[in-house]
Image (cartoon, rainbow, N blue to C red):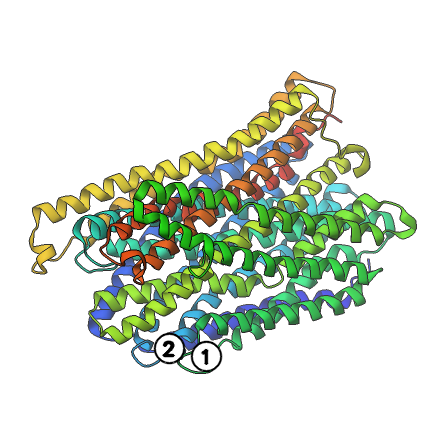
Amino acid sequence: MDVDALVYLVPIAGLIGLLFAGYLTWTVFRKDTGTPEMKEIGDAIREGAMAYLARQYKTIAIISVILAVIITVGMGMQYDNMMRGVFVGSAFLLGAFFSALSGYIGMFVSVNSNIRTASAARRNMNEALKISFRGGAVSGFAVVALSLLGVAGIFFLYLEFAASGILGAGATDSELISMALSLSVGYAFGASFAALFAQVGGGIYTKAADVGADLVGKVEAGIPEDDPRNPAVIADLVGDNVGDCAGRGADLFESTAAENIGAMIIGASIFALSGEVAFVFFPLVVRAIGLLASLVGVMTVSLRNENEDPNKALNRGYYVSSILAALGFAVICYLMLPAWEHFFACGVIGIVLSILIVYITQYYTAGEYRPVRKIAQASETGPATNIITGFSIGLETTLMPIIAISVGILSSYALGTMAAPSGENELIYGLYGTAVATMGMLATCAFILAEDTFGPITDNAGGIVEMSNQPEEIRQRTDKLDAVGNTTKALTKGYAMASAALAAFLLFAAYFEEVAVLLDSTLEKVFIVDLSQPPVFVAALIGGMLVFLFTSLTISAVGKAAYDMINEVRRQFREKPGILAGTEKPDYALCVDISTKGALKAMVLPGILPVVVPITVGLTMRFLYPGTDIAVQAVGAFLMVATIAGILMATTLNNAGGAWDNAKKYVETGHHGGKGSPAHAAAVVGDTVGDPFKDTAGPSLHVLVKLLSTITLVFAALFVVV
């Protein structure tokens, strides 16, 4: 098998990405940590975050090992080849480990960047921006580099040492590649599984603390945000890290890993038809180019003067990354693929789609536009109208993203079919076109994740400045960065949702490709989901229901933990009146413990449910309708409707929560009565309703839709009647 020399760019770019993450860590860590008061607060945040993560990862590790054993035994028995089960189970554990490692690296640097950002804000805005953004970029580059090296490493390892042993002598190159990818799917499943726990657990933790701190502190006691007198304030600041850094890092790690493997599975089908092996390796090479493009973009982020809006500096870096990624796409398409101009156009569609989603999300969640100001105005008549208006805005936000995603899928599919030689096999080429669009959208993933992690770093920096009683001028700088961070967090949620939609569609096609391989058939013959058949329709209903049940479990978990948090903060204020007077110190550790226990206890059921339900649906349909393809179609319908419902639900929750949050901030800037007014109290209530929407349930749904796809890829053999 002739491997294109460009494939060697994959390990080189991966190592450069890790070295760059190390360089950024060094540049951040050599900065000073500020005053003793700032250091004390920063240490409390770091200790709380690392303690929670250690307990969370212990839980994930135990469940992952149990599931790996089940996968090993189940796959071994299904294929009558125990070594095949061992390979899939081992890939699962590796995927879970690297997903957790990505989250750990991101959060470790984040909790050490926050205090350095706060200290830098004492000097100037530009230094604070650079430290916070480069601290966030460590997570971005570690995630993408580990994902790239992990997928490439497990694939080539299995291709070289495992595939031939399972297939035996005489296997063709196409068969060996398909087998190696089939074994590697466990890696994507492991990454998704660990990411779901990290996102759900982190989301429950952060919002339980946030709701308790806001409702009792701001509304009842009338004290400012991040006031050191609030017992829940340290738990709130810890939560920003475990939710937005560790959770989102694991989320985008599994996005890139699952998308790479799904695209390679489609590419392997084209290789079997055309003999062009470049279709298999192209996704890895393009990811490497995107990583290098993001590196240049990160280094360009800097303020031109102290009065410049930090958003402009971030946008410049993003545009540089996008332009370089597009140029790299053109070169790699030209060198590796036939009909390269069609696939290059697909990649450009993905890059443009990512920019569109960013602007659409910004319109619905930024304070300078109609939706947020409409919610702020509704706050004048109380919490009820604030919530009604905010939820209606959230529902409205599904329109433009879905139109953009739909146009992106249809146009990239059409361009892919045009690349089919002699008009044959248009379906598989069209699906590869959508895969290339997904690659284009994820090309700047490292930069986007840097923007996301930048948010909690600046939020924490503002809290440290407030709690250590720094001058108002410094707080104004961190407030400005915090406002930008809130916007970037909202934008990255929109980006993660859209990339999840494209990746889920790709993995949906990869599931049927895996079925075609198992049946020794073609994709065209098995790519059928007939909803007119009652069992297939029922499976689709269950898929939609799972999204709503999962959302309910995550939101109610926040409500339960927040209930305990609110009562604890009230108890401390009641029993220790010196806290509000400033003569007694609150018990921060007790509030941290409430969030920790609440998150760890509540994350298990939402994490296990998406694994159990699709397998149960598939096996039940196979048992009820033996000798037919009903089980395959039923699982396909389950996936299809769960993906659609998940995308719509996530869009609504993410954008409604972001709009509520910024409506509160809009009121706090002096509009509609400003801080302390009835409108402000109503806006705070709306914000607390939106907290579990945008930071717990919404982001967790991004992972859910991809987890369902990777589960069905791993267990496809259970549903197929050969």
Q: Which mark is residue 577?
A: none
Task: Give the residue pinned by disc 1.
Answer: 303
Contact flag, marks 1 and 2 (Cβ < 8 Å): yes
**Which of the 4 quarters of the picture holds residue 44?**
bottom left
* Left/right of residue 566 with respect to residue 192 in the rendered view: left
Q: Position of residue 285 (x, y in %)?
A: 69, 63
Answer with the quarter of the image where residue 384 lies. Answer: top left
Provide residue 247's location: percent of width, then percent of height.
44, 52
Q: Nearer the viewer, residue 133 or 370?
A: 370
Crowd band around label 2 with a 10 angstrom C-alpha radius: few (<14), some (14–19), many (20+) = many
Query: Quadrant of the rendered structure where residue 34 is?
Result: bottom left
Compared across the picture, whether 150 is left or right of 35 comes to: right
Location of residue 393 with respect to 666 vertically, above or below: above
Instruction: Determine whether, in the image, residue 145 is placed left or right of residue 394.
Output: right
Q: Pointer 1: residues within 10 angstroms few (<14), some, or many (20+)?
A: some
Can residue 585 be seen in this snapshot?
yes
1 or 2: tag closer to the N-terminus: 2
* Amino acid carrying mark 2 in the image: Met
- Marks 1/2: CA distance? 8 Å
- SS for dot 2: helix
Task: Judge whether 560 appears above or below 195 on screen.
Answer: above
Task: Relative to 72, say whether 45 is above or below.
Answer: below
How far from the left and from the top, in percent, is residue 607?
46, 38
Q: Which residue is mark 2?
A: 125
**Image coordinates for residue 317, horizontal then vertical, percent:** 54, 72
Question: For the point 52% across and 53% down, which residue is it?
Answer: 494
Identify the element where label 1 is drawn: loop
Q: Quadrant of the C terminus?
A: top right
Image quadrant in which the N terminus is located: bottom right
Viewer-side residue, 604 vs 70: 604
**Residue 162 visible, this angle:** no
